[in-house]
Image (cartoon, helix red, strand yellow):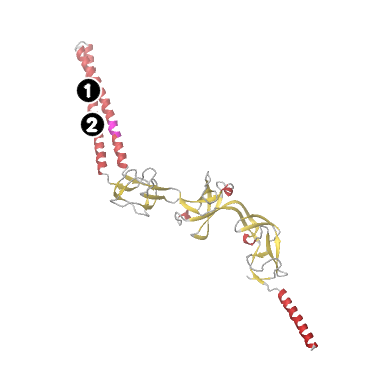
Amino acid sequence: MMRNKVFWIILIFLLAGLAVYLFKSETPIKVRLTTVSKGQVDLTVSNTRAGTIKACNRSRLSLPIGGQIAALFITEGDHVKKDQVLIRLWNKDQQARYAEAKANVVVTQLAAIESCRLAALNSREQKRLAGLAAKKLVSVERLDTATTQMAISAASCKKAKATINSAKAALQLQAAMLEKTELTAPFAGVIAEINGEVGEYITPSPSGVATPPAVDLIADGCLYVSAPVDEVEAAKIQQGMAVNVTLDAFRGETMAGEVTRIAPYVKELEKQARTVDIDVKLLDKSQQQRLLIGYSADIDVIIEQQTNTLRLPTETVIDGNSVLLYEVSSGTLLLKEFTPGISNWRYTEVKEGLSDGDRVLLTLDVDGAVDGASVTVEE
């Protein structure tokens, strides 16, 4: 009986020891590593909210007067030239006034010719009578009458010429009124939107009341990105700085740009940080042909740049200055501090503490991947 008790006690101790051993022994964790290498690192400033692709020139056009649309010369998507007529209102009455004013100019010109020729005739007659009066061949009264007629006809000539100027001014007025019945393109571009059809009446927008424009015109071949940047970060930006532009519509593609404008004021939007609008010009004009107005875009303004410097992915960095370094000899991870340089969301510069070719833990959210953990590398 005693022997059985001893046997069971010994067996329990052996099982307990085995359990402790099995508990303490570690199963290597599968991890993915990345290599510290040389490359380019940029210190950048990014937008706080999505930016927008905009046109350098965009006009929402409306006619200055109301009326019925008589002719619509465009459709949405058309490319138009500068000064091309887009919409014409019914204007037969105005055309008649213009024709009347034009004819009146001709009438006044003919009247001026008649009056000035008569003035020239009276001037010659006065000179002839003055010669005869000097020889006592005509009376003084007749010479005085001729002189008076010459002066009157000269004044009539001047009046007729002034009437021509008045008629021409009236013609210009009627031409301007006729021009108001036509909507023309202030620059070459693409028709984005039209509000109105032939036969409909359109009314100009009253003061303080916003109404849809008759035509939305977007300029050809000139696009830029406007994006908001936090007011603190905006202080680091200067005109001419290089910019990397990315768009959701073209994922994985980066377009080169340049800062062309920094807004001279800060925007204060409710429940959002105060921002400054930054305008960026796209350097490759061939890329602009693929872009549409209104695309969302993100910008990374390059404040400082280091080329051929030691770097590692920013996602591997712990607390800003540490990584989990893989030790090949022991197959374990080691928490290693290093001296960082400039960084962005992709890469962090390594000044000291790590060497070219070192391998560090790539993904920090692996369970059990901590300092001293035994790991196996998953390529």
Q: Do the residues labelled 2 and 1 touch (CB within 8 Å)?
A: no
Task: Tell me if 169 is positioned left or right of 307 in this view.
Answer: left
Splitting the image into 4 quarters, where does residue 137 fall? Answer: top left
Secondary structure of the residue carrying numbered label 1: helix
Q: Does residue 228 appear to the left or right of 197 in the view shown?
A: right
Q: Could you tell me which secondary element the residue under label 2 belongs to?
A: helix
Residue that badge 1 annotates: 121
Q: Can residue 123 be seen in this view?
A: no
Task: Name the residue rendered at 70%, 63% in the picture.
Answer: 335
Mark sitting earlier along the chain (2/1): 2
Using a 10 Å C-alpha cutoff, classify the residue at mark 2 as few (fewer than 14 neighbours), some (14 to 19) or many (20 or more).
some
Q: Is residue 126 magenta?
A: no
The residue labelled by disc 2 is 110
Asked which quadrant contains residue 361, the reply is bottom right
Vertical arrangement, residue 376 with respect to residue 55, above or below: below
Q: Which quadrant of the structure image shows residue 167?
A: top left
The 10 Å Cα crowd at callout 1, few under 14, some 14 to 19, many 20 or more, is few
Q: Position of residue 257 (x, y in %)?
A: 53, 52
Q: List the single residue furthest toward the right.
A: 2
> Is residue 117 in sight in this rendering?
yes
- Per the model, the C-alpha gap separating discs 2 and 1 is 17 Å
The dominant secondary structure in magenta is helix
Q: Pick the quarter of the image with the C terminus.
A: bottom right
Compared to residue 346, the image places residue 262 above or below, namely: above
Q: In this view, does 78 lie above or below 323?
A: above
Q: Which amino acid does label 2 sit on?
A: Leu
Residue 203: percent from the left, percent from the top? 33, 46
Task: Report the magenta residues as a range.
Answer: 164-169
Please state if 147 lies on the left or on the right of 235 as rendered: left
